[in-house]
């Protein structure tokens, strides 16, 4: 059932044994998994079926280059899955390990405890089987012929793509019809009230913008997304002296992953597999390259991935009518995507460039027409959508996209400001930067990949060595990945939650979010968020 606060009796709300705060990927997964086990759950969501238009609750401060606090976050049933890209990637078992050269690394959780949940998580995300090897593809040949010459220093894996599944659409009917679920929409939880010793949540404060109300609770799971989950914990800490024990990690160790496009791969013989492919089970997938674990350890590198990218659309020398069409139509693109399509660079569009783009469109009209048809059939009409457009560079080179883990650093943090939003909740400030270790690891990853590829007959990595440091240092945080600020660990001296996702020393409070990730790997977070939510559901059943 789905109801607004004004239509509910307090006694009815208080009767639910589990209360979940936030109805995004994490919250909906939990609600569905628990209700299917016969557990009654109250799912409290600040938004409704449509996006909340008033951004006041998310307005805060963010230090550049981090996105503003209102970007990349959506307040509606389904949360940010309303707009996510659907890329599903599990953590590597390596990510969970304690590594001497990565400060604050080491999850209190083994791969054996977490990874079994990936199969079910993939099912929730509509992303197929739990196989991320090339063997899962219909075409199982290597990405390029020379890969076998690299003696296993580099491995090829795939990333799977969700429909992309909007969790509110997928599970909406079940949320409405399940007799075990009540969704309380349009209601924000602005604070939690603890008992005196801070070891049990007694009540939470509900606020629909018109009235506020204290509701007694049994078990509580915070699933408000990486930033909002942290904010609710920080807001509660403000009036809970016993939670001073969390001050060394609450809000701290925030990470996003960093991403850049730099250099390019040149193949002198056979072209690599570049386009989206289908897995045996009919899911879109893309190939990617990673250093293997022994190589990462040997060179003290952070975990990362390399993907072949399409050329910068603003540069007409790519010769592609499709990219030029996108360039000419750029005004219809969301601002954040323009920078990505242009490889983070600034566009310098002169008349000559403009005419070169028009010439590309005219001479490559056949590709533009095919692209248009594909766009309609595979993007607009298909249920499983082609994730995005990939266009080859006609000169045979492939820009390289690099996506890396960051060291968990306590200076990267989310903190509360004095100012409050219209619900009376303190606004937040987000501070993010790359550490020297992040930058050093990125630089050496490019250099080492270049050296490795020298061993092959036909594949070379080309880049301007003088620009490498500047390129890596100016990488951007990936928007929408909000990680680490209520981290998982062994005790309250180094973390907020334990391996069950339960807040240390608080008997009835759990967090289901990327904010609990101890380290961030390079994997996009949602598949792991869903896996951890299923793990919590299993614990609470
Ligand atoms: C453009 C974009 C592309 C992305 N692409 C990918 C991708 O390809 N792969 C990937 O893995 N990830 C991707 N992500 C990230 C992905 O969307 C998030 O990891 C995922 O949605 C997080 O799920 P969540 O449930 O933790 O939080 P959210 O989806 O943010 O949901 C949280 C919900 O909780 C509600 N809420 C918050 N606080 C409160 C409160 N106090 N009271 C009541 N309700 C509250 C919010 O209204 C929201 O609906 C992308 C993100 C963006 C923005």
Image: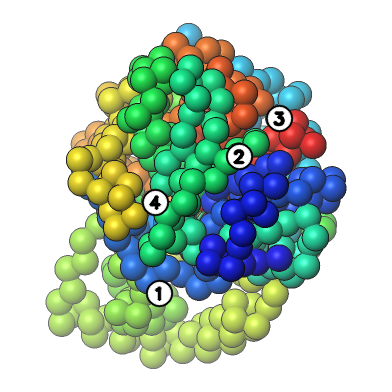
Tell me, for residue 114, which label it has, or none. Answer: 3
Helix or strand or loop: what does disc 1 sit on?
Answer: helix
| Mark-to-mark CA distance, 1 and 4 | 23 Å
| Mark-to-mark CA distance, 3 and 4 | 25 Å
Circle 1 residue: 323
Circle 2 residue: 217
Tell me, for residue 479, which label it has, or none. Answer: 4
Q: Residue 77: which quarter of the image?
A: bottom right
Lateral position of residue 1 relative to residue 324, left or right: right
Up the image or down, 165 lies above or below 109; here it is: below
Up the image or down, 142 lies above or below 328; here it is: above
In this orientation, does residue 195 appear? yes
Label 3 or label 2, whichever comes before in sequence order? 3
Within 10 Å of the Cα at label 2, are there few (<14), some (14-19), or many (20+) other Cα atoms? many
The colour scheme applied to this rendered structure is rainbow
| Mark-to-mark CA distance, 1 and 2 | 54 Å
Label 3 or label 4, whichever comes before in sequence order? 3
State yes or no: discs 3 and 4 in contact (Cβ < 8 Å). no
User: Residue drawn 47% across and 51% down?
Assistant: 213
| CB of mark 4 near ligand 1 (< 8 Å) | yes
x%, y% of residue 452?
50, 29
Foreground: 309 or 50?
A: 50
Label 3 or label 1, whichever comes before in sequence order? 3
User: Looking at the image, is mark 1 or mark 2 nearer the viewer?
Assistant: 2
Helix or strand or loop: what does disc 2 sit on?
Answer: loop
């Amino acid at each position: 059932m789905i109801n607004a606060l004004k239509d509910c009796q307090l006694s009815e709300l208080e009767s639910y044994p589990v209360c979940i705060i936030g109805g995004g990927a994490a919250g909906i997964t939990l609600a569905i998994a628990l209700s299917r086990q016969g557990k009654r759950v109250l799912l409290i969501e600040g938004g409704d079926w449509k996006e909340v238009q008033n951004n006041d609750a998310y307005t805060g401060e963010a230090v550049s280059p981090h996105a503003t606090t209102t970007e990349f976050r959506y307040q509606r049933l389904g949360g940010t899955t309303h707009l996510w890209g659907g890329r599903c990637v599990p953590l590597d078992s390596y990510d969970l390990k304690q590594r001497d050269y990565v400060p604050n690394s080491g999850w209190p959780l083994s791969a054996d405890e977490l990874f079994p949940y990936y199969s079910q998580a993939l099912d929730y995300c509509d992303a197929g089987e739990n196989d991320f090897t090339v063997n899962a593809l219909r075409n199982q040949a290597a990405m390029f012929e020379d890969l076998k010459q690299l003696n296993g220093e580099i491995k090829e894996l795939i990333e799977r793509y969700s429909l992309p599944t909007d969790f509110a659409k997928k599970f909406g009917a079940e949320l409405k019809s399940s007799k075990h679920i009540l969704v309380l929409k349009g209601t924000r939880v602005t604070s939690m009230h603890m008992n005196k010793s801070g070891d049990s949540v007694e009540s939470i404060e509900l606020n629909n913008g018109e009235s506020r109300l204290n509701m007694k609770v049994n078990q509580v799971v915070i699933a408000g997304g990486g930033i909002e989950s942290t904010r609710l914990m920080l807001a509660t800490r403000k009036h809970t002296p016993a939670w001073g024990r969390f001050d060394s990690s609450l809000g701290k160790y925030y990470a996003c992953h960093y991403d850049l496009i730099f250099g390019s791969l040149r193949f002198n013989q056979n072209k690599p597999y570049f386009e989206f492919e289908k897995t045996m089970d009919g899911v879109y997938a893309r190939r990617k390259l990673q250093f293997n674990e022994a190589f990462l350890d040997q060179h003290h590198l952070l975990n990362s991935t390399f993907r072949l990218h399409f050329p910068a659309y603003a540069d007409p020398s790519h010769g592609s009518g499709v990219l030029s069409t996108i360039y000419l139509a750029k005004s219809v693109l969301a601002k954040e995507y323009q920078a990505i399509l242009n490889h983070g660079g600034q566009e310098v569009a002169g008349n000559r460039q403009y005419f070169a783009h028009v010439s590309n469109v005219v001479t490559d009209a056949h590709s533009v027409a095919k692209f248009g048809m594909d766009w309609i059939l595979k993007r607009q009409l298909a249920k499983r959508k082609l994730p995005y457009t990939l266009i080859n560079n006609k000169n045979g080179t492939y820009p390289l996209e690099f996506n890396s883990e960051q060291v968990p650093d306590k200076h990267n943090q989310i903190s509360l400001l004095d100012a409050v939003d219209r619900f009376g909740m303190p606004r937040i400030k987000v501070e993010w930067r790359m550490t020297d270790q992040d930058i050093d690891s990125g630089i050496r990853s490019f250099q080492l990949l270049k050296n490795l590829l020298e061993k092959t007959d036909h594949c070379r990595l080309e880049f301007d060595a003088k620009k490498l440091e500047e390129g890596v240092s100016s990488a951007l945080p990936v928007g929408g990945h909000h990680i680490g600020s209520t981290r998982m660990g062994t005790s309250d001296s180094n973390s907020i939650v334990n391996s069950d996702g339960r807040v240390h020393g608080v008997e009835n409070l759990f967090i289901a979010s990327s904010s609990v990730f101890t380290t961030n790997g390079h994997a996009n977070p949602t598949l792991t968020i869903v896996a951890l939510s299923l793990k919590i559901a299993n614990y609470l059943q």
